[in-house]
Amino acid sequence: MKMNNILKTTALLLGSSVLLSGCIKETFPESGYATSDQTAESPFAKEGLITAMPTVLITNYTDLGEHIDFGYPGIFGATDRMVGEVFPVSGNLPGGNQYYDRWQAWLYPGNSTGLAANGWASPFFYTNYYKFIFTANEAIDIANQSEGAEEMMGIAKTFRALCYLDLARLYDALPAKAPERPAYETELEAVKGLTVPIVREDTSMEELENNPRVSREEMFKFIFEDLNTAETLLANYTPATKNLPSLAVIYGLKARAYLWLGGFTESYAEVPTGDAAYRLAAEYARKAIDASGCTIMTESQWLDPKTGFNTVNSSWMWAMIQTTDTVLNNLLSWSAHMATEAIWGYGYGAQPGISVFSYNRISSGDFRKKSFVGADRSFDAIAPYTTLTEEEFATIAPYASFKFHAANGEKRNYSTGNVTSIPMMRVEEMYLIEAEATAHYDAATGKSLLQSFMANRDPAYTVPAANDLIDEIIFQKRIEFWGEGVIIYDLKRLNIGMHNGDTGTNAPPMAQLSTDGRAPWWNCVFPLNAVQQNKALSGKNNPNPTQTVKSVK
């Protein structure tokens, strides 16, 4: 019996109001589902499946019991907090509340057990990604039974590859030092080189109950098979909107995958590693740039207080696009948490901000620095880039971010302010992948590529002579993609530690963590219910990473 013999309706997956309006134009059976054969015969249902894939990313609700439970953007927020790139700064000034930042399990892993297998937060990544994969598998299953469904197949395989690429990198158990529980380091040996179970469109229920984690090599072979198929099927496809993938996006996913493999010295028969992988990462990053037709964001696009980072622009290759139908409520929304101007939500109270160490390292001529409140809290300096009044700004702490804005700069009306777009892939990432990947085998060219890119951010920029080139490229990537859920994979791959526990930190208590290389909680743990349902995971979970590093406060 196939796992996907039954196509659950969009009402079951997402709530009927999300996808039925304008997409699925036939009445579904009263039982609440249609068979795969019925769906294969319906062009409207196929159209709905294509729409379902980008929509489920921004509407999936896992019943976590917390307001960060709004799908893929919620994952972005979690990963940036678990590496210490984003944290609430409001506690540094009277009037704010750091606990309005609801990603607390990922902010405070040294003091909480939320990320353990039996912790409240551990199902978040796992459940979301496998629900995303379920939707892609449904589309693949239908496309296999249908004539003229090549585009649907290519789109579905691209979405599936995205999910497995993220999962592989999040759950890959890489060495990490755990001073508060050294046994963690030896416990990793039992799962070394393992990623996650693969669920295909034809995986049976029996197989799901005994579905082992696959090796890094097997996983990336599978990912590249999906991407190669998608590359062929979407070679001449141009999506109507950027919430669907293009050929450039496929190249971009290949660039991300090869970049990850570049961090390993093991030799595999089926996939490249080391410099060979880095060369391919650079090659596909350049192909993505050329195929995308995208241009690097300008200062005016970046800093616009009404459209900055909430509206698809010429640099975005792939995006999540909200509509009034996909906004779940006032608080289950990206803007409610990440827009400091969102007075109706958590953003205004929590004030997501940047590390003082990162802020101080940004050159004074780099316009990206204007996205953050300076140490002097000058309203005049930030006023052109926010819709807050001076009175409303009075409680905003140093280093708070004004990168992400609610729709049209809205401050109080969530029903309009939450209807924003969120970038999934920007062309700038491809430029920085190309620069870093090249730098690993050709430092001079890598330096030149970084210099060329940075001319778009600070015309006076020169690569600092004292800085390690790879470190400098990664730093610029940290600033470029602050808050966008990108950087965890680079920090984990390159074994770059956290420094929010160093003297002079502006991180809140319990988030003041410094690590010697990657942190243990970057090796994500399967939730207990997944281990109970899949006996192949028994004894093969990543070890408990919580409370392995003590916070300064």
Image: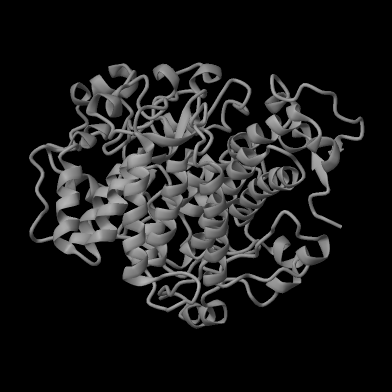
Nearest to the observer: residue 29 or residue 50: 50
Residue at 49% across, 48% down = 78
Nearest to the observer: residue 211 or residue 376: 211
**x then y, percent, for residue 525:** 58, 64
State the residue lying farthest toward the right.
Answer: 30
Looking at the rendered image, the quarter that the N terminus falls into is bottom right
**x then y, percent, for residue 509:** 38, 52
Residue 161 visible within the image: yes
Looking at the rendered image, the quarter that the C terminus falls into is bottom left
- Above or below, 354 against 20 in this view is below
- Above or below, 177 against 114 in this view is below
In-image side of 432 versus 509 (left or right): left
Residue at 7% across, 59% down = 465
**x then y, percent, for residue 363:** 14, 43
In-image side of 240 versus 358 (left or right): right
Nearest to the observer: residue 202 or residue 468: 202
Residue at 79% across, 30% down = 42
Q: Quadrant of residue 281?
A: bottom left
**x then y, percent, for residue 416:** 52, 17
